[in-house]
Image (spheres, grey):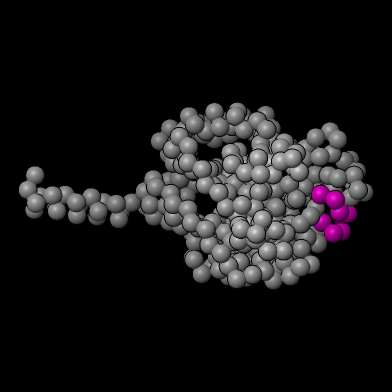
């Protein structure tokens, strides 16, 4: 190949790459919005920073409120209303994910009975939307999971229920083997911080307990990334062609500075070019 033909070939490849679909989106997680601790004000600051990035859409990765688990109905409704009102500041289309703190009345001290109509995940569904679903954007499929399992003794664990697993199987099959896929979960499917959080935390509540079942299914398809929350850390694991990304948190150490003093408050900014996905972490002035 001559120098001239090499330059022409490289230029053609560059032009082809520039014509590939390109878009950006934000993964923002663990907002923990509440009337106290200037949380709503700081969420608004975060949303302003997100708007400046001009993403095509935003995924809010769970724990939208703090905390619906242990409070009476009036307080839980106030929290969800505050989130909805504040989230209107986000200018791009918004897709929400269910987190453990978004489950209403699970703890007995809430005074809520399991027989009440909006108990558990029902209040989230009524006020925010579906627990799990998928959507497509520029040839990519995005799959939102409900990773919160509820136990008979009224606790939560990380789990993807059998019915949802069958739904996931069907959604992936419909996407086909070649379509690029992003999966979003609140509780991680894969994380390197489990050992750092033990023994203070029950490991069943840190990672999805049946993650191996989910991962075995995901690895059969063109899954480019799994976006996660819950731990409030900034983390990226590359394994078998998939990025497992935990995008820190909006609230840091529950609105008391960076998580563990080292993971600052912020959000994930993701850029897609062709089939390449790149994640960077953005902080904001809280």
Position of 233 with respect to 173 (left or right) is right
* Nearest to the observer: residue 174 or residue 70: 70
Whether 88 is drawn above or below 237: the answer is: below
Quadrant where the N terminus is found in the figure? top left
Outermost residue, left side: 2
* Quarter of the C terminus within the rendering: bottom right
**Above or below, 266 relative to 63:** below
Position of residue 23 measured from the top left corner of the image (x, y, whole percent) = 43, 56
**Residue at position x 66%, y 36% in the image:** 208
Q: Is residue 124 left or right of residue 281?
A: right
Which residue is at 62% across, 62% downward? 265
Q: Residue at x 14, y 53 (%)?
A: 7
The magenta segment is: 69-76
Towards the viewer: 73 or 187: 187
Residue 99, placed above or below residue 54: above
Q: Position of residue 246 (x, y in %)?
A: 58, 49
Asked whether 72 falls inside the magenta stretch, the response is: yes
Whether residue 130 is visible: no
Q: Is residue 246 left or right of residue 104?
A: left
Query: Where 29 sits versus 217, above or below?
Result: below
Q: Looking at the image, can residue 259 be seen? A: yes
Quarter of the image for residue 213 reads top right
Could you tell me which residue is drawn at 79 percent across and 55 percent down? 67
Closer to us: 1 or 21: 1
Report x, y in % for residue 34. Answer: 76, 63
Residue 64 colored magenta? no
Count of all numbered marks drawn on residues in the image: 0
Residue 217, given in percent of the width and then of the height, sits at 54, 29
Q: Tell which of 203 and 116 is nearer to you.
A: 203
């Amino acid at each position: 190949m001559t120098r001239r033909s090499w330059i022409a070939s490289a230029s053609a490849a560059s032009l082809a790459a520039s014509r590939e679909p390109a878009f950006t989106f934000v993964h923002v997680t663990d907002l923990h919005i509440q009337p106290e601790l200037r949380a709503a004000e700081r969420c608004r600051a975060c949303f302003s920073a997100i708007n400046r990035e001009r993403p095509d859409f935003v995924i809010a990765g769970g724990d939208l409120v703090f905390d619906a688990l242990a409070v009476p109905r009036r307080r839980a409704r106030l929290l969800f209303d505050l989130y909805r009102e504040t989230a209107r500041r986000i200018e791009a289309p918004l897709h929400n994910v269910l987190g453990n703190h978004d489950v209403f009345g699970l703890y007995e001290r809430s005074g809520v009975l399991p027989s009440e109509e909006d108990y558990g995940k029902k209040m989230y569904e009524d006020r925010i939307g579906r627990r799990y679903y998928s959507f497509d954007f520029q040839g990519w499929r995005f799959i939102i999971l409900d990773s919160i399992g509820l136990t008979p003794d009224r606790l939560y664990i990380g789990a993807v229920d059998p019915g949802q697993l069958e739904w996931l199987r069907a959604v992936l099959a419909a996407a086909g083997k070649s379509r690029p896929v992003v999966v979003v979960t609140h509780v991680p499917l894969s994380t390197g911080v489990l050992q750092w959080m033990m023994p203070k935390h029950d490991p069943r509540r840190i990672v999805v307990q049946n993650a191996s079942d989910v991962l075995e299914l995901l690895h059969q398809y063109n899954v480019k990334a799994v976006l996660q929350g819950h731990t409030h850390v900034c983390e990226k694991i590359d394994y078998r062609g998939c990025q497992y990304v935990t995008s820190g948190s909006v609230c840091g150490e529950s609105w008391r500075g960076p998580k563990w003093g080292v993971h600052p408050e912020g959000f994930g900014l993701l850029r897609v070019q062709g089939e390449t996905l790149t994640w960077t972490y953005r902080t904001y002035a809280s």
